[in-house]
Image: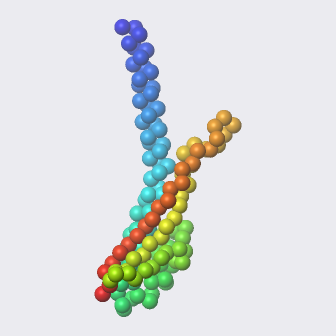
């Protein structure tokens, strides 16, 4: 029964390590996905605006203003605006490097590159 107590402590430490690693990964991966969500909403608003013939020409000014207001690391020219098959499609492709383990004397840096796409669609009016 004495050995059982030691094994229980090791299991607890391993579980804490797994849970801590999960929280760390969540904290590292969540910001780019939240940014992609904001970009998707912006792309959707822009597509609706582009689909409307009365506001279709003001799209680039709208994008520039929204990028500035939301402090996004993009420019209006990074967005692709396409009229295809009766709908307006606005999209932006971007990458984000997630540094999971920073480099030090003992461990090399470990990063993952995320390739993300934010897209919005709206039917033409």
Position of residue 82 measured from the top left corner of the image (x, y, whole percent):
43, 80
The residue drawn where x is 35% and y is 75% is 121
Q: How is the image coloured?
A: rainbow
Residue projecting furthest to the bottom: 54
What is the total number of numbered labels drawn onto the structure image?
A: 0
Picture coordinates of residue 93, whole percent (x, y): 49, 67
| Residue at (44, 72) in percent of width and height | 91
Residue farthest right in this picture: 105
In the displayed structure, 8 sits above or below 74; it is above
Q: Is residue 106 above or below residue 95?
A: above
The answer to whether residue 49 is seen in the rendering is no
Quadrant of residue 56 within the rendered picture:
bottom left
Q: Position of residue 118 (x, y in %)?
A: 43, 67
Residue 14 visible at all: yes
Image point (49%, 49%), residue name: 28
Q: Residue furthest top?
A: 1
The residue under the point 47% across, 38% down is 21
State the residue in front, 82 or 25.
82
Quarter of the image with the C terminus in it: bottom left
In the image, residue 78 sits, relative to residue 2, either above or below, namely: below
The x, y position of residue 106, in whole percent, is 66, 35
* Quarter occupied by the N terminus: top left
């Amino acid at each position: 029964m004495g050995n059982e107590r030691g094994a229980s402590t090791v299991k607890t430490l391993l579980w804490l390590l797994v849970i801590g690693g999960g929280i760390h990964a969540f904290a590292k991966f969540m910001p780019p996905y939240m940014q992609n969500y904001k970009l998707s909403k912006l792309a959707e608003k822009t597509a609706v605006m582009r689909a409307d013939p009365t506001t279709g020409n003001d799209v680039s000014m709208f994008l520039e203003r929204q990028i500035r207001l939301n402090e996004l690391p993009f420019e209006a020219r990074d967005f692709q605006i396409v009229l295809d098959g009766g709908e307006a499609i606005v999209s932006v492709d971007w990458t984000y490097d997630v540094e999971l383990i920073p480099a030090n004397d003992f461990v090399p840096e470990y990063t993952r590159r995320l390739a993300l796409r934010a897209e919005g669609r709206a039917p033409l009016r």
